[in-house]
Amino acid sequence: MNNLYFPKGEEMNSLERFKETVCFGKPDRPFLRPQWFFKETVKRWQKEGMPADVHVNTYFGFDRIEIPPIRYPEYWDEWKRCVKDRDYPLGISAGSFYGWVRNWMGMEKCDNPELVKEVINYISDFVCKTIEKAVSEVKFDFALIWEDLEMKNKDFNFTRFIQKILSSRLQKGNRFS
């Protein structure tokens, strides 16, 4: 690859590119995170000419990235050895603190701020305890936490309340870094 950053054509691996991208460095190109596609969409693309024996991520040139599920398989020690000297970013899923609550209870039942706070605190403690072993034994490059805070039907004070709770819980999670 010949570009502004690497004129001699040195191409970065996915891990180097990821770190340069998220740290505002000079990657050889932007890190391209793999996307999720409907099976029907992939089948249509294959009918339109995309090879069936090539993975979608490879076909579109996405970088390799892995986010294993939060569980400890029987072969945990072997898996740790496999990811030790990788050339791609490895993340850990840390779930969602408010998004899960909203999905489980529904927005209309999230009107009790103290209940919402209690459940968010419980979830964040549970997630932190669940991933503690993995984070202490494996060098992860990032944690994936999703939150959907769109609240067009909630007032601004409720949104600020949720953001305040999440901010304190996310700071607690930073102890892993």
Image (cartoon, helix red, strand yellow):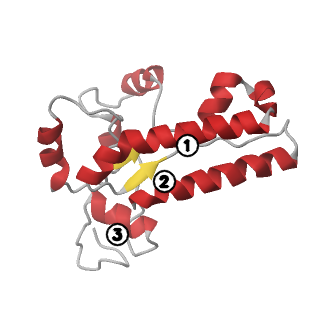
Left or right of 19: which side holds 113? Answer: right
Instruction: Tell us which disc is closer to us: 2 or 1.
Output: 2
Instruction: Tell us which disc is closer to us: 3 or 2.
Output: 2
> What SS does tag 1 mark?
loop
Crowd tier of the residue under label 3, counting other residues whose Cα lies within 10 Å: few below 14, some 14–19, many 20 or above: many
Residue at the disc numbered 3: 28
Q: Earlier in the sequence, mark 1 or mark 3?
A: 3
| Amino acid carrying mark 2 in the image | Gly
Q: Which residue lies furthest to the right in this view?
A: 155
| Amino acid carrying mark 3 in the image | Asp
Left or right of 89: which side holds 33? Answer: right
Residue at the disc numbered 2: 173
Q: Which of marks 3 and 2 is nearer the N terminus?
A: 3
Q: Residue 93: where, in percent of width, then height? A: 42, 42
Residue 94 visible (yes or no):
no
> What SS does tag 2 mark?
helix
Q: Residue 29: where, in percent of width, then height? A: 38, 65
Residue at the disc numbered 1: 146
CB-based contact (under 8 Å), mark 2 and mark 1: no
| Amino acid carrying mark 1 in the image | Trp
Residue 66 visible (yes or no):
yes
**How far separated are the C-alphas under marks 2 and 1?**
14 Å
**How far separated are the C-alphas under marks 1 and 3?**
28 Å
Relative vertical location of residue 176 with respect to residue 61 in this rendering, above or below:
below
Q: At 72% from the left edge and 33% from the top edge, which residue is drawn?
A: 115
